[in-house]
Amino acid sequence: MQTLDQIKAPHGVRDNDKLESIMQSMRNGDEITPVVVDIMGRALCGSHRIAAYNALTDAGEEIESPEVIELTDEEMVAADEWAESFAGPKGLWGGIDLYYDFDLLCRAVVETTTREEVKAALADQI
């Protein structure tokens, strides 16, 4: 199982207010939405959660890490097959730059996974 400090975020922090809000929620021990990662250790969501966690732990604060949900090979293959109609024969993993077509990537995973926790974690990404 990967930890947040090992995971590559999909993008940098774009909203400092959101970052501060998540940091405060982490300090309060509030429930934080899990971070979903592919089998290569890249997050599909959670840039602000990852940044908040790393900032707080780097500052010496002891907080609980948000859950990390790792996609399986089967989930990635299913998402790739679903997306072929949008991305062409190379599918998501070989033909789409994840940083430009992230909405499609998240939608493909949500459309094909059977795990409700993955769908819930990606709900605000699509």
Image: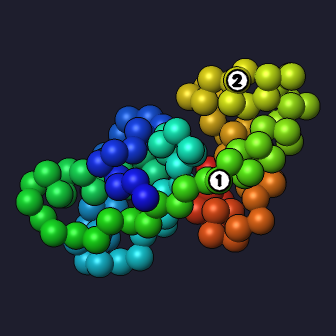
Question: In the picture, residue 21 is in which quadrant?
Answer: bottom left
Q: CA distance from mark 2 to mark 1?
A: 17 Å
Q: Looking at the image, which residue is at 36% across and 40% down?
A: 13
The answer to whether residue 109 of the structure is visible from this angle is no
The residue positioned farthest toward the right in the image shown: 85
Instruction: Name the residue tied to disc 1.
Output: 72
Residue 39: which numbered mark, if any? none
* Depth order, front residue of 72/115: 72
The answer to whether one can see residue 61 in this image is yes
Q: Quadrant of residue 65?
A: bottom left
Q: Which amino acid, by three-letter code, is at mark 2?
A: Gly
Nearest the viewer among 2 and 59 is 2
The numbered mark, 2 or 1, whose residue comes first in the sequence reads 1
Mark 2, mark 1: which one is toward the viewer? 1
Residue 50 lies, in percent from the top left, at 35, 51
Check disc 2 and report its element: helix, strand or loop.
helix
Q: Which residue does the image show at 86% across and 31% down from the upper left?
A: 84
Residue 94: which numbered mark, if any? 2
Q: Secondary structure at mark 1?
A: loop
